[in-house]
Amino acid sequence: MKAIKAVRGMYDSYGMDSRLWGRLDRAWGQIMHAHAYDQLRSPIVEPVGLFARAIGEVTDVVEKEMYVFEDRGGEKLALRPEGTAGVVRAGIEQGLLYNQIQKFWYAGPMYRYERPQKGRNRQFHQMGAEVFGLNGPDIDVELIEITAQLWRELGILDGVTLQLNTLGQSEERAAFRGQLVEFLNSIRSQLDEDSQRRIDTNPLRVLDSKNPDTQALLANAPVLSDFLGEESIAHFEGLKAGLESAGIRYEINPKLVRGLDYYNRTVFEWVTDHLGAQGTICGGGRYDGLVEQLGGKATPGVGFALGVERVLLLIEAMEQIPSDLGRDADIYMMAATDAAEGQIRAMARELRAAQPELRVAVHHGGGSFKSRMKKADRSGAQMLVLLGDDELAAQTVTLKPMQGQGEQRQVAQAEWITQIKS
């Protein structure tokens, strides 16, 4: 029979990739816990209308990329293409947002029907955070600080650059849009086909076109900052001052608009030149009108999402994979005789309880002593814990450093875990 393969653009994660992913998960969870954010788990499947209203009907995501289907009841559903809309929907539905301050984080798969390439898959994964009920730039700063802390812990901070912009308020953006459309129409025939289409649907997206010829034509385009009022300017200045106080470097990118319609005021992206065309690893900003747009009462909001696969690729590209991830185990525990099998398993349970951060492997499958030792060596473990007839009689344990790190020694069974720790 013909073998069944994974859906194009969707893949399996295992081995080193899975271990590195686990390290990212742990670092992310610890940082969000330390900042007092609560996890919110929302469904992978949502009504199509949620994304059409939140993201914008004329965005590429809604027009071209969503996985849309009807269930058996005739309801039109979509696999979620991003995380923010679902979090907002849940907050409104569960009464979590109005006149409240909420800080949420999420993680999980998203789906977009795109051309698969390195760093861009049809099933991809995001980790994100959303904050509701706070108006000031200080919370924008906190979210960016969280991302910077994560990059620092992963060893990739030197490989990324923070880009900032402000989109102002809706009325300011409307005035700018009018001037921008007038300018774009004056050069319409020279623009690429995609940009020509966007003039009539989403003209701000022309500004972040990846077409170099189009970018050259935009040199004399109107600048959004010229249309900002005092309140928007003050918010952006507060954001910049907060980042400078936190020691976070940034660049101003006046053409940064992000790909979704719901943003206002602050927008930001972390970009890298280590991954070729897929240079954005994280992005976010403010969406103060989104809750009301989705049927809730007016509530300010701000958030970001990072692309897990791209972050993992960047860790690999910058050679920041921790050496311990190459080991199948930190400690390898082995019974030299059948009589010691039960006790070695009990000792493994004791060590896992005492030091849960360690990867503790127990030998299985029998075999000669020589073959058992080969398996222990191939595991990459730093320490072999050996228990045989001699050790049982003397109530001791043999500790053998692996990878040529030292001499083996026997220790009392009452002290072996203390010796492992030291």
Image (spheres, rainbow, N blue to C red):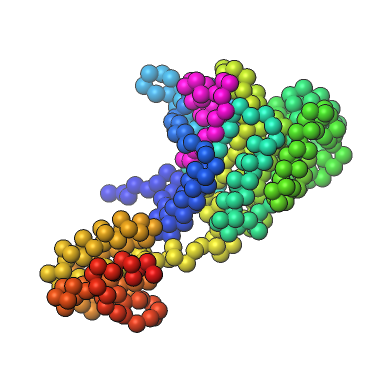
In the foreground, 272 or 93: 93
Which residue is rendered at x = 57% and y = 51% of the image? Answer: 150
Q: Position of residue 211 (x, y in %)?
A: 73, 45
Q: Quadrant of the C terminus?
A: bottom left
Q: Is residue 101 magenta?
A: yes
Residue 139 visible: yes
Q: Position of residue 10 (x, y in %)?
A: 45, 45
Chain part drawn in magenta: 83-111
Say left or right for 239 vs 293. right
Please state which of residues 204 and 363 is positioned toward the viewer in this rendering.
363
| Extreme residue toward the bottom, this view | 407
The answer to whether 47 is drawn above or below residue 195 in the figure is above
Foreground pick, 301 / 242: 242
In this view, 394 is above or below 198: below
Q: Quadrant of residue 257?
A: top right
Find residue 39 and report its horizontal and vertical position in percent: 47, 36
Residue lying furthest left: 339
Left or right placement of residue 198 versus residue 187 in this view = left
Tell me residue 124's x, y (percent). Answer: 50, 43
Q: Is residue 4 magenta?
A: no
Residue nearest the observer in this picture, 24 or 29: 29
Q: Residue at position x 43%, y 20% from top?
A: 75
Q: Is residue 214 left or right of residue 333?
A: right
